[in-house]
């Protein structure tokens, strides 16, 4: 996709191009949202693409998924204490992924969680 791609041409309809510290456009990169990640995980659960790590994680069951949530939560804490903001953001993204895998594994919907926010 060219750097001149308009906001309407992005998958989300928003301008997802990254900007450097001076505000110059760097590249176009799709941005996942909490909702789009959840939709992607639900799709993988329904269609079960061969070789999918998400399918394997779902098949491993809630116990294994819960262990990954705990592991990733610990890594978020450690990153918050000792790592860069970028490393912390990466760990948080992994925690969010595993929380959503657990949600899909249990059959929860986003609305089930949103009711409690």
Image: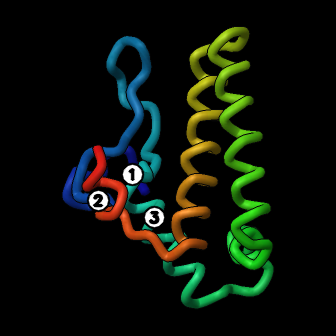
Q: Which residue is mark 2?
A: 12
Say which quadrant the C terminus sits in. top left
User: In front here: 93 or 76?
Assistant: 76
**Residue at mark 3 to residue at mark 2: CA–CA distance:** 15 Å
x then y, percent, for residue 37: 47, 60
Q: Which residue is mark 3?
A: 38
- Please rate how many residues cluster around mark 2, counting C-alpha atoms within 10 Å: few if below 14, some from 14 to 19, many from 20: some
Which badge, 2 or 1, comes first in the chain's sequence? 2
Say which quadrant the N terminus sits in. bottom left
As drawn, 94 above or below 97: above
> Of tags 3 and 2, which is closer to the observer?
3
Which residue in the rendered view is the most extreme toward the bottom?
A: 47
> Of tags 3 and 1, which is closer to the observer?
3
x then y, percent, for residue 114: 29, 54
Q: Secondary structure at mark 1?
A: loop
Could you say which quadrant of the image residue 78 lies in? top right
**Residue at mark 3 to residue at mark 1: CA–CA distance:** 8 Å
As drawn, 77 above or below 112: above
Q: Secondary structure at mark 2?
A: loop
The answer to whether marks 3 and 1 mark residues whose Cβ atoms lie closer than 8 Å is no
- Please rate how many residues cluster around mark 3, counting C-alpha atoms within 10 Å: few if below 14, some from 14 to 19, many from 20: many
Q: Secondary structure at mark 3?
A: helix
Could you say which quadrant of the image residue 59 lies in? bottom right
Q: Which residue is mark 1?
A: 33
- Please rate how many residues cluster around mark 1, counting C-alpha atoms within 10 Å: few if below 14, some from 14 to 19, many from 20: few
x then y, percent, for residue 46: 55, 88
Could you say which quadrant of the image residue 89 lies in? top right
The answer to whether marks 2 and 1 mark residues whose Cβ atoms lie closer than 8 Å is yes
Which badge, 3 or 1, comes first in the chain's sequence? 1
> Of tags 2 and 1, which is closer to the observer?
1
User: In front here: 19 or 58?
Assistant: 58
**Residue at mark 2 to residue at mark 1: CA–CA distance:** 9 Å
């Amino acid at each position: 996709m060219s750097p001149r791609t308009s906001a309407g041409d992005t998958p989300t309809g928003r301008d997802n191009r990254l900007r450097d510290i001076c505000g110059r456009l760097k590249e176009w990169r799709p941005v996942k949202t909490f909702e789009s990640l959840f939709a992607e995980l639900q799709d993988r659960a329904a269609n079960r693409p061969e070789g999918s790590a998400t399918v394997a994680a779902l098949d491993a069951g809630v116990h294994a998924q819960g262990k990954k949530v705990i592991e990733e939560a610990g890594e978020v804490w450690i990153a918050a204490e000792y790592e860069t903001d970028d490393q912390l953001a990466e760990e948080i993204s992994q925690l969010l992924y595993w929380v959503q895998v657990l949600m899909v594994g249990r059959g929860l919907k986003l609305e089930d969680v949103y009711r409690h926010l």
